[in-house]
Image (tube, rainbow, N blue to C red):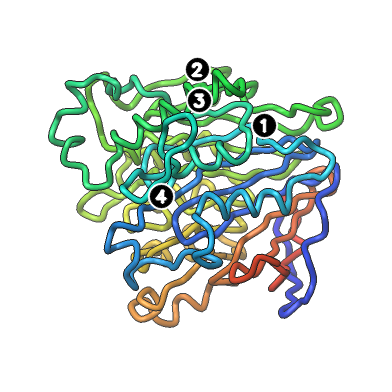
Amino acid sequence: MFALSVWISHGQDTQLPNWKPGFLDIHHINTGRGDAAFMVFPDGTTLLVDAGDMSETHPRTTSNRNAKLAPNRSKSAPEWIVDYIDRFVPKNQNRQLDYALITHYHDDHFGEVDSLRKIAPGGYQLTGIMEVGSLLPIKKLIDRGFDFPLDLKDTKVQSTERFSKDKYGMVPTLKEYWKFIAHQSKENGLENEALKVGAVDQIVLKHNPKDYPDFSVQNIASNGVIWTGEDENAFSLFKAGEYPGENPLSNCIRIDYGKFNYFTGGDIAGIDRFGQTDINALESHVAPVIGPVDVATLNHHGNRDSQNPYYVRTIRPRVWIQQNWTADHPGEEVLRRITSKRLYPGERDIFSTIMLQGTKDVIGGRVDQYKSQEGHIVVRVYDNGNMYDIYVLDDTSEERKIRAKYGPYKAR
């Protein structure tokens, strides 16, 4: 089930070999400003999950508490995302994203407006996914919708204290997002949909699906609505009018390719305010329908409220990937849980896009358990989903050369 040996080579002065048909490539891009994962499916279909772009006007963003804009400040975070995609998109495909998926409406996942943002010809401010979509056409944009559990377009909702005093400006950013969607739909044919929980026919192979019958994207959860594991049946944790915050409303998907499984769930969590496992939280409910996977991203960047013991024991990945940008991640107790062989046996490797000095000062030698603590992290799945490798690419240079390669791993 698990790879018994891991081949590691450091200091390689080489480029990542080009994608070719049959490869599933999952690139976790480090810009220092939030999550972004670019995926190339086995037939060349492309998907971008999130386009984080935290505002440079917040002292938190520019302090030592947070990561620096990577690789440098010559471009914005969305411009670096597009630059990265242009480097690794299949050369025989049109220059476009077949799909973009926004997990939820926080700045480190879809952008944030401020006084420094430029205005696009469509009249909207350029940030996050809006800037990405202005530079690189998106065919279908999937989000969590806007009308459940609260109607975010309702001015009464917008004027409540929760939103009117939000210092990170979610509602003002959403207003620009809706302008972006309207303009791109009219001018470039952008399609916008909410994630359909339980569906396997919303994000599909667009080019040669018959060649890869064992590939699928399973929609697991959205807005606290969770797939039961049967057909497209689902149940909801929240009622209309009940707003638990953005994180529990995150879109969650599982990607399956042959024996290989990958899960990413935005900022869902599973630890309550007292530091105990919350059996009613999103992690606890989605874990049984996710099942064991080969690779999983750390929910909520590895924040202390995530990766509860039941969730860890249930999905038990061989590889954990942390998309990080702050010294607050990971929580030491999270690291204890995901490395515990009392929760599940066998080896597991952990990779992070960045590890800040503040984290190292607090956690100390425990961070040495990470295979890599900086760089873009690429999962390359091949042999019809039977095998995969992990590449770490240099995030300090536009050349993005290989720093290390780990594998081969055998899919379960």
Q: In the rendered structure, are the residues bearing label 4 and label 3 in contact, judged by CB atoms less than 8 Å apart?
A: no
The amino acid sitting under disc 1 is Asp
Cα gap from disc 3 to disc 2, whole angstroms: 14 Å
The residue that disc 1 covers is 98
Q: In the rendered structure, are the residues bearing label 3 and label 2 in contact, judged by CB atoms less than 8 Å apart?
A: no
The amino acid sitting under disc 3 is Leu
Q: Nearer the viewer, mark 1 or mark 2?
A: 1
Q: Nearer the viewer, mark 3 or mark 2?
A: 3
In the rendered structure, the answer to whether residue 404 lies left or right of residue 130 reads: right
Q: Nearer the viewer, mark 3 or mark 1?
A: 1
Q: Which mark is residue 195?
A: 3
Cα gap from disc 4 to disc 1, whole angstroms: 22 Å
Q: Residue at x 27, y 46 (%)?
A: 168
Q: Residues within 10 Å of mark 1 (few under 14, many from 20)?
A: many
Q: In the rendered structure, are the residues bearing label 4 and label 1 in contact, judged by CB atoms less than 8 Å apart?
A: no
The residue that disc 4 covers is 108
Q: Which mark is residue 233?
A: 2
The amino acid sitting under disc 2 is Asn
Q: Closer to the N terminus: mark 2 or mark 4?
A: 4
Q: Secondary structure beneath disc 4?
A: helix
Q: Residue at x 44, y 47 (%)?
A: 311
